[in-house]
Image (cartoon, rainbow, N blue to C red):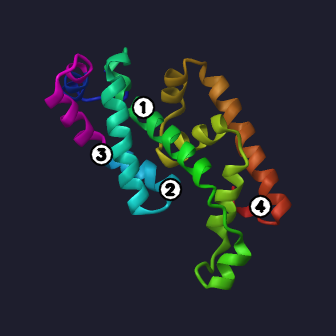
Amino acid sequence: MKWGVDVEDLEIASKAIQGEEQSFIQLMQLHKKVLYRTAFAFLKNEHDAIEAFQEVTFRAYLKIHTVKEPQYMKTWLIRIMMNYCQDHLKKKKRYISNELLQEMGFYTDNTNLEMEEAIASLSRAEQQLIFLKYFQDTKIKEIAEIENIPEGTVKSRLHKALKSLRNFLTEKGDVDHV
């Protein structure tokens, strides 16, 4: 058993992989909160997050037979969600400047917007690494297993991503946040 994965959860995942529909429904219920939180973190609104959950449920249903290791089911689902959200954001291209938001009176604290902008400046792989580590609280050892790379490589990539964030925020004059 890896990183506290429940034996019952593994059994549900295994049955879902084998095509058992009731187990698939249980699996999605089991991971519903983490998938919704992931979607909401990327998409920033409830409607889009719910829509993302529905789409990811459909995609997972179609591809669940491709999962080789039941203990990685949660990570597999989160990856599908992150990929869907990033694609969705690219399509929507909803980048609104700080100035426009301030003029409209919707935003008074620039910290979150600047941090989002800084994270958006990273490569897709770096964004996923930051998301797994800091938004999903995934341990470095777990990330290494998921990515099938040494822990040292995860640490160095994480260090590089954080350095890029620091540089981006320093240029903006907001270095205290990283």
Split into 4 quadrants, where in the image is the N terminus?
top left
Q: Quadrant of residue 76?
A: top left
Q: Residue furthest left?
A: 22
Q: Is residue 21 magenta?
A: yes
Q: CA distance from mark 1 to mark 2?
A: 19 Å
Label 1 CA crowd tier, 10 Å (few <14, some 14–19, many 20+): some
Label 4 CA crowd tier, 10 Å (few <14, some 14–19, many 20+): few
Label 2 CA crowd tier, 10 Å (few <14, some 14–19, many 20+): some
Tell me the residue at 69%/63% (across/down): 114
Left or right, residue 45 beside residue 73:
right
Q: What segment carries the magenta color?
A: 14-31
Instruction: Name which of mark 1 and mark 2 comes first in the sequence.
Output: 2
Instruction: Name which of mark 4 and mark 1 comes first in the sequence.
Output: 1
Instruction: Name which of mark 1 and mark 3 comes first in the sequence.
Output: 3
Residue that mark 4 sits on: 175
For label 3, the SS is helix
Q: Quadrant of residue 161?
A: top right
- State whether residue 85 appears in this view: yes
Residue that mark 2 sits on: 43
Instruction: Name which of mark 4 and mark 2 comes first in the sequence.
Output: 2
Label 3 CA crowd tier, 10 Å (few <14, some 14–19, many 20+): some
Question: For the residue marked with disc 4, what is the amino acid?
Answer: Val
Q: Main secondary structure of the magenta part?
A: helix
Q: Nearer the viewer, mark 4 or mark 1?
A: 1
Residue that mark 3 sits on: 32
Tell me the residue at 74%/50% (across/down): 165
Q: CA distance from mark 4 to mark 2?
A: 25 Å
Question: For the residue marked with disc 1, what is the amino acid?
Answer: Thr
The percent coordinates of residue 38 (x first, y second) are 44, 48
- State whether residue 34 appears in this view: no
